[in-house]
Amino acid sequence: MKKLAVSLLAVCVLAILTSSAHAIPAVAKIWLEDAYATSPVIEVAKEAQCNVCHYGPSKRDRNDYGVALSKTGVTMKNYNALKGDQEKLTIILKAMFKKAEGLKSVRGKTFGELIRAGELPGTAPEGED
């Protein structure tokens, strides 16, 4: 019975940890300070901060750019494995950003085109501004 209780507790803890979405601070830091530091979008992105990838008050809500990024590489699982190696994490994140640049936004342009034009790449779902 004790083993069952411990196992059940472990499953509950894992469910809580894996179901919660997180804005990963290292992603924002590398995006702002390294990958796009000299881009025309940087001033607007510094003001928008988390809303480069998210919308609304909950960081569970990703705009189309945040969704695209989440499909190109880093998950919480592999982020936790990489966060001790900042150099490797930076290389992987920059590759992820580059990959997302070629994907189409809901506005019809690629995320890269929007970034180079000095526009925030993400768009919240209609009615969710």
Image: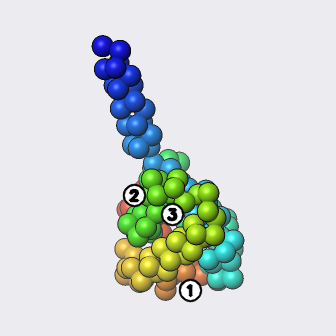
Residue with the mark numbered 1:
116
Q: N-terminal of the two: label 2 or label 3?
A: 3
The tag on residue 127 is 2
Of the two numbered discs 2 and 3 in the rendering, the one whose residue sits closer to the viewer: 3
Residue beneath the point at 37% across and 79% down: 104
Residue at 40%, 76% (x, y): give it. Answer: 105
Direction from residue 105 to residue 113 in the image, left or right: right
Q: Secondary structure at mark 1?
A: helix
When the figure is inspected, residue 116 is found, relative to residue 90, above or below; the finding is: below
Q: Amino acid at mark 3?
A: Cys
Q: Which mark is residue 76?
A: none
Pinpoint residue 103: horizontal percent, then vertical percent.
39, 79
Asked whether the beta carbons under mark 3 and mark 1 sit within 8 Å of each other, the answer is: no
State if disc 3 and disc 2 touch (CB < 8 Å): no
Q: Position of residue 36 (x, y in %)?
A: 63, 78
Image x and y of residue 69, in percent: 44, 68
Are there few (<14), some (14-19), or many (20+) residues within 10 Å of tag 1? Answer: some
Q: Residue at x 63, y 70 (%)?
A: 87
Label 3 – label 1 distance at C-alpha: 16 Å
Between 90 and 98, which is closer to the camera in this rendering? 90
Q: Which residue is mark 3?
A: 53
Q: Is residue 34 left or right of residue 89?
A: right
Of tags 2 and 1, the one toward the viewer is 1
Q: Quadrant of residue 17?
A: top left
Q: Determine whether 16 is above or below 112 in the image.
A: above
Distance between the alpha carbons at the discs numbered 2 and 1: 26 Å
Residue 56 in the figure: left or right of residue 44: left
